[in-house]
Amino acid sequence: MIPFANNARLIISLITCTTLVVPPNPHPTVSCAPAAHPHPAPGFITVPAGTYAIGKEGSSRNPQRTVHIDSFRIAIYETTNRQFAAFIATTHYLTDAERHHNAMVFEPGLEEFRWMQDSTANWRWPNGITRGGIQDRMDHPVTCITYNDALAYCAWAKVRLPTLEEWEVACRAGTKTDYFFGAEDSRIGEYANIWHGHDHLKADYTDGYMYTAPVGSFKPNPWGLYDMYGNVFEYCTGKLSPTESPGIAHGRGGSWWCSRNSCHSFNSYSIGSINIQASFSNLGFRIVTLR
């Protein structure tokens, strides 16, 4: 099973630019443009406190509602291999996949929602050793990490993960449609690294990437946040119900694997679920600063 599929499929530092304060509805100009690869500049936007509309009408997992959010600062980009490598170099932390050799990876030819375990896969070799490492992908999002690994990085960096609600407020950027660019997904290729093929039997390089893309390779949302859709699912904190198992984590935004025919979670409202000890090569995170 692949994480973050449709509901029935699933359970399984410095700031070198000016921080931007984002008003709830206007479309501001980002004060920190993405640097040319391979070194995108880190940065954050500030989302002001306020009441925001989130969810989707008729959804049992994420019903339509309004929420009050305190002000927070969220990273413009997903956390990269370069940033995660700095954490490892300082702490010598071993990820769950490095200890348990149980990361799940994908290669073209697998049937829909089928992934395979690769004992050689981890954040350094996110699709297994035979498919290459991260040496030339340091500014791609880090993957093959568990929810607990992401929390360990956050503790070291003195940051945190966004809550489910914060992530959606930042993603929507003041919009109320299913996508921050409109009601339909016809323009998704402008904003997200996704799978454009009808199925996953053949490799898909339609947008230039089969797996992850360097962060910031596609257009940002109206508030200047990149890769809110596609590239990798992003871990968030929070539960869908008070009785939900503590062994379940959630992520949002879709991934490079997601297509219109499978998963289709590259939108503002979907919420995926995964075991906190599971590692997949389409799953990463972005950070929020501490107050």
Image (spheres, grey):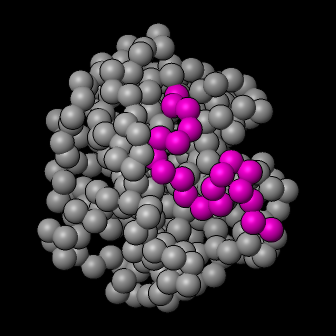
Quarter where residue 35 is shown = top left
- Taking 216 as reference, is 152 above or below it? below
Q: Give left or right: position of 145 versus 116.
A: left
Task: Say which residue appears at 53% left-offset and 48% top-offset.
Answer: 252
Q: Give left or right: position of 194 versus 153.
A: right
Task: Measuring from the top left, give residue 86's x and y in whole percent.
Answer: 22, 62
- Taking 43 as reference, is 144 above or below it? below
Work out whether residue 202 can be spotted: yes
Stretch of the chain drawn in magenta: 202-221
Quarter where residue 112 is shown = bottom right
Task: Say which residue appears at 21% left-offset and 34% top-offset.
Answer: 16
Task: Measuring from the top left, give residue 213's x and y in whole percent.
Answer: 54, 53
Q: Main secondary structure of the magenta part?
A: loop
- Taking 136 as reference, is 71 above or below it? above
Work out whether residue 241 can be spotted: no
- Nearer to us in this view, 253 or 127: 127
| Image quarter hosting the C terminus | top left
**272 falls in the magenta region:** no
**211 falls in the magenta region:** yes
Work out which residue is located at the far right of the displayed protein and give it: 198
Task: Measuring from the top left, give residue 228's x and y in whole percent.
Answer: 51, 40
Q: How many marks?
A: 0
Task: Say which residue appears at 19% left-offset and 70% top-offset.
Answer: 89
Q: Give left or right: position of 91 versus 214.
A: left
| Image quarter hosting the N terminus | bottom right
